[in-house]
């Protein structure tokens, strides 16, 4: 399992950047919101379960590895 | 049209609420606070509706007031009936104001089996929820917390109704005076759920998870962030992913489902449900016409999976030039897709059309295909449009380049482009057009207030042939399909009139009735009656019933195409039929007058009155008495 924190800066979303927690388990990419509260500290709230890449032409492809999954997320921030 | 009821009390309340619950005593409709038999509209003595659980005073619920204050000029919350409803704000007629933001209820659900309803009854056999919803699309600086979405329902000993109420405590809708004062679940969406400025639309109850899936969007720029903790100045319109009501049946309170993801400058539509019972949604960008996302919402754990994305401008194919329309034809265009329909090229699968304008500004809708087994989607852009008679788009239709609708705007929903498809006479058609919430912006521009219709090739749905177009007499503010699945009759709300159109393959969309009223809302109840509300005394709304069963077309045909008069009278017949706005034959008295000296009726006279039939042709004897031309003039006897 590999983890990456993505700085979401896509201008079609909020003007302010925010962080997205990415986790790849070998086949599926999970994206989580990162929230903080006084009781639990940092809390991850999963919101995307992505078993494949959606490509810009409308097709799908399986992730090759974590690098591929994270790169896809970075280049498709409008999906997150 | 008949005026049914005026507002009696200076208390803000919904004008019409149809009780769609089941069991004894449910056959009611509430006009204001008063109860009526739903079938006969007979007043029910000493019975009424109040949302105040304490039974003291009248609690406001919905809207029946126009007044002069813009923030009171609510878009929705006036009519709650179990059929299509379209509501508009009528307090403003100027361009580029937040009060122009449109109620897109006609398009929020693309699923013809699950049309959006502003009142709905969900049940698991032992427990039910009767919910009402409505929200204020318009914007005001303070974002009033008391005019967003709301729900109410009831508990009944025979069939327990879970009380779920957003915004207001409410009592049993069927309680008689004194009002019920028990404890009911209560959820104020303004404090813990979707915040002011956003509207939510329940689209699907998932029986497996017991969650009600809602869809939310903001028509103005104050919208919630993901954590629902702040209202933020953002860009509109916008939509949210992941909104649901948890434990919808079976408890007396519910909660919203945690994290939401918020997208600005995008609109959202409910496509339908996958084979696993999960809702599918379509997201469409306003910035361009080709960035689309389809996602599956797993409400059990409040996550989603992207099923499809395409942010690539199409290449030229067919007559579609492809590319990006840019800002040459106005900047941000909010677009709504059609209902889904059976894909004629792929048995068992579904399809729909989504508006797109190529780099020359020409309408070439995407033809989407949905494989319902694999939930894979294909976007086809190789569209060919055949313009009949050497015509072209520029001859009949023009973009809105007159009103700003843009970036960081509080009135981003003031205009929309729709394309709706329907079947008539065995053929499929596609109609597209523009709506503008001001009701005035397109008055100087006839082509911009024109709806254009294409016939879809039966074998290849990517081939469209121009069929017809019509100019709405004044700016179309919004539309209601009286049957929002069939979509062959529509009412158009404008500033001064309500126009009724009916589609036939021969004539296209034809204006069949003009009602000279400024309607703030129109809805069809479960009995097929059309309710409408218009400004009345003291700034409050009057409630009307619209009758559309008047004849709009009378057909008179002779039994022979020509008669050869040789000096002897010829006995013959004419066939008379009267049709209503739906094109359905109806029974009515028709006066016939012969204009000319070569023909009489069998009585020897030149006038007669006949009663037409709703089931068969009506034959009227005539006598040809000479050579020459005679006309028969028909008129309805009311």
Image (cartoon, grey):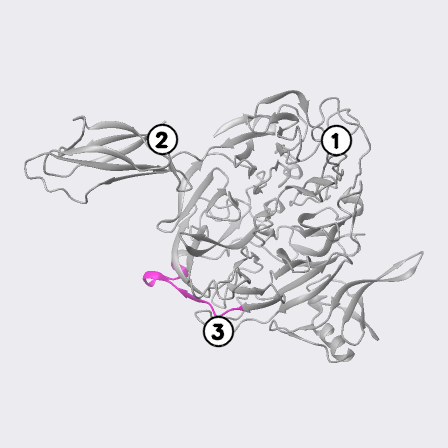
> How far apart, in angstroms, are the residues tagged by discs 1 and 2?
45 Å
x and y percentages locating residue B460 in the rendered image: 44, 66
Q: What's the chain of the residue with tag 3?
A: B
Q: Is residue B228 left or right of residue B354?
A: right
Occupied quadrant, residue A20: bottom right
Q: Are marks 3 and 1 on the same chain?
A: yes
For mark 2, give the secondary structure.
loop
Q: Specify start and end residues of the magenta stretch as a single range.
A: B380-395
> How far apart, in angstroms, are the residues tagged by discs 3 and 1?
59 Å
Q: Residue at label 2? A: B588
Q: Residue at label 3? A: B316
For mark 3, give the secondary structure.
loop
Residue at the image point whose x is 50% and y is 67% from the top: B358
Tell whether label 1 touches label 3 (CB within 8 Å). Answer: no
> How far apart, in angstroms, are the residues tagged by discs 3 and 2?
54 Å
Of the residues under marks 3 and 2, which one precedes in the sequence?
3
Residue at the image point whose x is 63% and y is 47% from the top: B98
Q: What's the chain of the residue with tag 2?
A: B
Disc 1 crowd rating (10 Å Cα; few below 14, some 14-19, many 20+) is: many
Residue with the most extreme top position? B45
Residue at the image point whose x is 69% and y is 40% from the top: B131
Q: Are marks 1 and 2 on the same chain?
A: yes
Residue A26, compared with residue B550, is above or below; it is below
Disc 3 crowd rating (10 Å Cα; few below 14, some 14-19, many 20+) is: some
x and y percentages locating residue B601 in the rendered image: 19, 30
Of the residues under marks 1 and 2, which one precedes in the sequence?
1
Residue B171: give its label.
Answer: 1
């Amino acid at each position: 399992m590999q983890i990456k924190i993505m700085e979401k800066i896509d201008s079609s979303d909020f003007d302010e950047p925010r962080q997205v927690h990415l986790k790849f388990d070998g086949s599926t990419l999970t994206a989580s919101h990162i929230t903080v509260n006084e009781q639990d500290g940092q809390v991850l709230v999963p919101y995307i379960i992505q078993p494949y890449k959606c490509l810009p032409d409308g097709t799908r492809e399986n992730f090759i590895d974590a690098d591929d999954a994270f790169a896809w997320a970075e280049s498709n921030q409008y999906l997150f | 049209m008949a005026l049914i009821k005026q507002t009696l009390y200076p208390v803000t309340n919904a004008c019409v609420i149809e009780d769609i619950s089941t069991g004894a005593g449910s056959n009611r409709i509430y006009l204001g606070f008063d109860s009526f038999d739903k079938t006969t509209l007979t007043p029910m003595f000493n019975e009424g509706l109040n949302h105040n659980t304490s039974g003291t005073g009248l609690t406001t619920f919905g809207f029946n007031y126009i007044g002069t204050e813009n923030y009171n000029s609510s878009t929705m919350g006036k009519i709650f009936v179990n059929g299509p409803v379209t509501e508009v704000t009528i307090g403003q007629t100027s361009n580029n104001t937040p009060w122009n933001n449109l109620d897109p209820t006609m398009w929020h659900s693309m699923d013809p089996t699950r049309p959006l309803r502003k009142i709905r009854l969900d049940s698991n056999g032992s427990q039910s929820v009767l919910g009402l919803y409505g929200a204020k699309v318009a914007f005001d600086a303070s974002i009033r917390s008391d005019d967003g979405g709301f729900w109410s329902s009831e508990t009944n000993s025979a069939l327990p109704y879970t009380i779920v109420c957003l915004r207001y405590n409410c009592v049993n809708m069927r309680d008689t005076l004194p009002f019920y004062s028990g404890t009911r679940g209560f959820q104020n969406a303004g404090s813990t759920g979707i915040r002011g400025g956003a509207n939510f639309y329940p689209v699907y109850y998932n029986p497996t998870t017991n969650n009600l899936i809602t869809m939310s969007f903001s028509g103005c720029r104050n919208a919630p962030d993901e954590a629902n903790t702040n209202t933020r100045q953002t860009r509109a319109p916008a939509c949210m992913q992941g909104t649901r009501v948890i434990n919808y049946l079976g408890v007396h309170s519910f909660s919203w489902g945690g994290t939401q993801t918020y997208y600005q400058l995008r609109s959202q539509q409910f496509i339908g449900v996958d084979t696993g019972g999960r809702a599918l949604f379509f997201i469409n960008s306003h910035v361009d016409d080709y960035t689309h996302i389809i996602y599956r919402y797993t409400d059990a754990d409040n996550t989603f999976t992207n099923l499809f994305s395409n942010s690539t401008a199409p290449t030229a194919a067919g007559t579609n030039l492809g590319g990006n329309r840019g800002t040459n034809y106005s900047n941000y265009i909010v677009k709504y897709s059609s209902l889904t329909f059976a894909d004629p090229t792929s048995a068992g699968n579904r399809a729909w059309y989504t508006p797109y304008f190529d780099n020359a500004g020409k309408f070439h809708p995407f033809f989407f295909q949905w494989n319902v087994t694999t939930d894979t989607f294909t976007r086809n852009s190789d569209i060919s449009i055949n313009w009949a008679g050497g015509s072209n788009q520029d001859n009949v239709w023009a973009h809105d380049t007159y009103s700003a609708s843009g970036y960081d705007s509080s009135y981003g929903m003031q205009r929309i482009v729709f394309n709706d498809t329907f079947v008539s006479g065995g053929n499929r058609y596609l109609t597209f057009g523009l709506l503008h919430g001001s009701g005035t912006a397109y008055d100087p521009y006839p082509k911009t207030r024109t709806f254009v219709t294409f016939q879809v090739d039966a074998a290849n749905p990517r081939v469209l042939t121009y069929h017809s177009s019509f100019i709405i007499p004044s700016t179309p503010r919004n539309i209601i399909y009286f049957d929002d699945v069939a979509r062959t009759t529509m009412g158009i709300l404008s500033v001064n009139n309500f126009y009724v159109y009916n589609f036939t393959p021969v004539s296209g969309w034809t204006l069949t009735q003009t009602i000279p009223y400024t309607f703030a809302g129109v809805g069809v109840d479960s009995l097929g009656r059309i309710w409408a509300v218009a400004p009345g005394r003291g700034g409050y709304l009057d409630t009307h019933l619209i009758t559309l069963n008047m004849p709009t077309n009378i057909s008179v045909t002779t039994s022979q195409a020509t008669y050869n008069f040789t000096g002897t009278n010829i006995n013959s017949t004419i066939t008379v039929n009267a049709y209503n706005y739906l094109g359905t034959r109806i029974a009515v008295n028709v006066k016939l007058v012969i204009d000319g000296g070569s023909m009489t009726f069998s009585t020897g006279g030149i006038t007669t009155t006949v009663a037409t039939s709703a089931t068969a042709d009506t034959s009227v004897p005539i006598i040809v008495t000479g050579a020459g031309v005679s006309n028969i003039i028909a008129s309805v006897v009311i």
